[in-house]
Amino acid sequence: QRLYRQVYQRIGIRYGIVTSVDGYDEISLTGSFKVVYNDEEHIYQPEEFGMPVIRPEELYGGATLEEAKAIFDAVLENRATKAQKNVVLINAAFAIHVIEQDKTFLECLDIARESIESGRALEALKKYVAFMS
């Protein structure tokens, strides 16, 4: 995290770095997590955002590429487990918040939720794949 922070500061871009205190390189919701922005950092608990703490085994990403793809597809098709969906939502919300700093984090969480539940996230991926093909 420190290396990324130094690089982003030298480049001079707006950034946000998230890590879970228990070692994940993203917000895992398995416990507290740290968020570092250009000029501030905070440690949060999942409950602060209406998210339950989840067990690490609920984050199982699959043993094969096919299993991982199936989980990814389930999230974008809004049929993933609640734990999987919540982890994606909170990470997406913090990413949105880096760009939309005038919005509250809860507004960013609503944007992320609406994107998945409406199917817009899946449509954006499909457009990207078509563009790259």
Image (tube, rainbow, N blue to C red):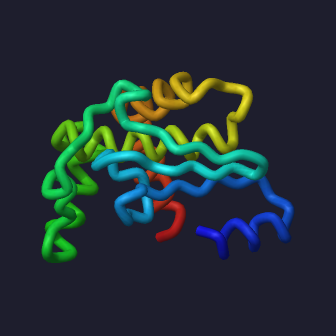
Tell me what residue is drawn at x 37 percent, y 63 percent: 24
Tell me what residue is drawn at x 59 percent, y 57 percent: 17
Residue 58: % across, % down: 16, 51
Q: Using the image, determine if residue 128 lies above or below residue 68.
A: above
Report the quarter where the N terminus lies.
bottom right
* Closer to us: 126 or 1: 1
Q: Is residue 61 visible?
A: yes
Please indicate whether residue 3 sits to the left or right of residue 126 in the image.
right
Q: In which quarter of the view is residue 29 placed?
A: top left
Residue 129: % across, % down: 44, 62
Please indicate whether residue 40 sits to the left or right of residue 25 in the image.
right
Q: Is residue 122 visible?
A: no
Tell me what residue is drawn at x 85 percent, y 70 percent: 10
Please indicate whether residue 49 sits to the left or right of residue 104 in the image.
left
Please indicate whether residue 78 sits to the left or right of residue 127 in the image.
left
Tell me what residue is drawn at x 55 percent, y 23 percent: 107
* Closer to us: 103 or 70: 103
Q: Using the image, determine if residue 86 lies above or below residue 117.
A: below
Residue 68: % across, % down: 22, 66
